[in-house]
Amino acid sequence: MSILLTESQLVDEDAHFAKNRFKLIVTGSKNVGKSALIRRLDSNTFEEKKSEDRITKALARVIQGAVVRSDVQEVGYDVFERDEGGFLKQNEIDWLDVKGIIVMYDINSKESYNELKRKLPLVQNTVAPNCDICLVGSKADCEREVPFELADRLAEQMDLSLFEISSKTNINCEAMLVEVLDKIIERREAELEHWQEIRSNQPVYEDVVEPSKPSEEQVPSNPFCWIPRIPFISKIF
Ligand SMILES: Nc1nc2c(ncn2[C@@H]2O[C@H](COP(=O)(O)OP(=O)(O)OP(=O)(O)O)[C@@H](O)[C@H]2O)c(=O)[nH]1
Ligand SMILES: [Mg+2]
């Protein structure tokens, strides 16, 4: 067997990425419309009747000329809770894999906005640094309790995107998803460039390395390699 070192470089182009497939998380307090948003994006439908099920869907969109697939999963804020040791109480999500997170509040509920503000640092500390965080104010078709300027100021302070959407009347849902995926792709391109730069700086070995064969010649054992402990000599030293 021979090992060609040029084939076993440290960084392979796709080692860290499933091409054009991303995991997105949708979170927010209860009843903000997480399921309704995913349903709108998946099947372009809206149901007044509430379902308690947490939805996971695979969505496909064309972004920058390429088909991009995203696995969208709905979770509550409970997944961010930590124990006294600072460890996440639940480990159902591999956060390193998550490339985007949509954090929702209901523009009709000040409480949901206040909870978002409380939970946001927890979310930021849980996701990977390259994860895109997007704030989304839902139920834009309803009467407003949270002024847009208030949420806008928060988004600006935190350097995050902000969208107001309505899953009922289908306002901004698609635009928000496309913006999130677009940002993820741009970040991924930058990461790819970074890895390619590292790759190009690695030394390339052209040699074929043959593993050494076990010697057939028997090495005679050396009877003198074992030096007995002689009391007289150890006293001298
Ligand atoms: N008017 C209006 N109602 C909405 C909108 N989105 C969701 N709703 C309603 O709000 C209620 C809650 O919506 P869900 O999508 O179940 O909310 P959720 O965040 O998934 O709730 P949990 O999973 O229980 O935390 C439902 O009765 C929806 O019909 C919207 O854009 N406009
Ligand atoms: Mg739900």
Image: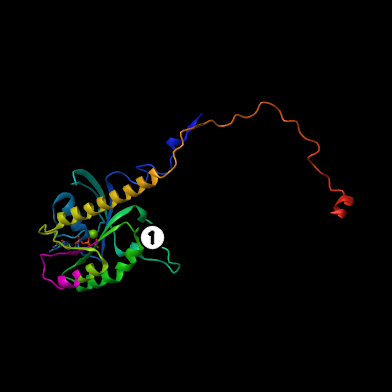
Q: Residue at left 18%, top 43%?
A: 65
Q: Is residue 139 magenta?
A: yes
Is the residue marked by circle 1 packed among few (<14), some (14-19), or many (20+) residues within 10 Å?
A: few
In the rendered image of this protein, does residue 184 appear above or below residue 113? Answer: above
In the displayed structure image, the side of residue 148 where residue 157 appears, left or right: right
Towards the viewer: 182 or 107: 182
In the rendered image of this protein, does residue 117 appear above or below residue 7? Answer: below
Give residue 175's quadrant in the image. Answer: bottom left
Q: Position of residue 230 (x, y in %)?
A: 87, 48
In the rendered image of this protein, does residue 27 appear above or below residue 10? Answer: below
Extreme residue toward the top, this view: 216
Image quarter where ligand 1 lies: bottom left
Give residue 55's quadrant in the image. Answer: bottom left
In the displayed structure image, the side of residue 75 where residue 201 appears, left or right: right
Towards the viewer: 144 or 66: 66
**Looking at the image, how many numbered discs can be counted on the residues?**
1
One can see residue 193 in this view: yes
In the displayed structure image, the side of residue 140 where residue 124 appears, left or right: right
Give residue 224's quadrant in the image. Answer: top right
Q: Position of residue 75 (x, y in %)?
A: 29, 59
Q: Position of residue 89 (x, y in %)?
A: 40, 63
Disc 1 element: loop
Q: Position of residue 151 (x, y in %)?
A: 20, 70
Q: Residue at left 25%, top 51%?
A: 186
Residue range in magenta is 134-152
Q: Which residue is mark 1?
A: 90
Q: Quadrant of the C terminus?
A: bottom right
Q: Residue at left 29%, top 43%?
A: 19
One can see residue 94 in this view: no
Towards the viewer: 87 or 182: 182
